[in-house]
Amino acid sequence: MVEAQPIHVLVIGESSDNDAVAVCAAERSGGIHIARTDRVDDAVVRIGVEAFDAVVVDESTMRVPAIDIARKLRDRAPALPIVVLTDRENEAPQDADPESIDDVLRKDRLDPRTLGIALRFTIERSARQHAERALRDAHSELRTAWQIQ
């Protein structure tokens, strides 16, 4: 069996004791390397200079709505998958925007293994979607060029 490559994730949100235990467990069991920040501006800078496979926004610990955070991150790194952790029953942050947020996960339904699987799935899905979009754009440009001739 091929061992999965470790993934590098930036978690945005204030840390609690429970979150710290879950993060440590996820790092040990899921091949996830986690960096943390509780400041959105710091996250925007870090995604510009460090290589992350995804960003996780812990909505319940932030004063700023997750969608606003996601839009700032998307402006800086359009292809970087953004996952929101929520405590909400409806599993979606207010004003969720599918162009800004790639996935929403309920904190109470996650264990370290499930978090690792969900993050890997989101990263792979996001990469596929961006590749498909690039292919469609290239096809459209070729079609336009062909029509001009």
Image: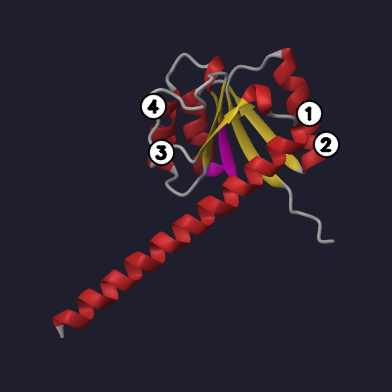
Where is residue 64, by image quadrant?
top left
**Alpha-carbon span between mark 2 and mark 4:** 31 Å
Q: Residues within 10 Å of mark 3 (few under 14, many from 20)?
A: many
Vertical order, 3 against 22 (above or below): below
- Dot 3 or dot 2: first in sequence order is 2
Q: Amino acid at mark 2?
A: Arg
Task: Write down the residue under mark 2.
Answer: 28
> Which residue corresponds to mark 3?
100
**Residue 142 relative to residue 128: left or right:** left
Q: Between disc 4 and disc 1, whose residue precedes? A: 1
**Magenta part of the protein: which range?**
49-56
The residue singled out by tag 4 in the image is 68
Numbered disc 2: secondary structure:
helix
Q: Circle 1 is placed at which residue position?
A: 24
- Spatial CA distance of label 3 from label 2 is 29 Å
Do labels 4 and 1 touch, CB within 8 Å? no
Q: Is residue 50 magenta?
A: yes
Q: Amino acid at mark 4?
A: Asp
Label whose residue precedes the other's in the sequence (3 or 4): 4
Say if mark 2 contacts mark 4, CB within 8 Å. Answer: no
How much space separates mark 3 and mark 4, taking CA atoms? 9 Å
Quarter of the image holding residue 98? top left
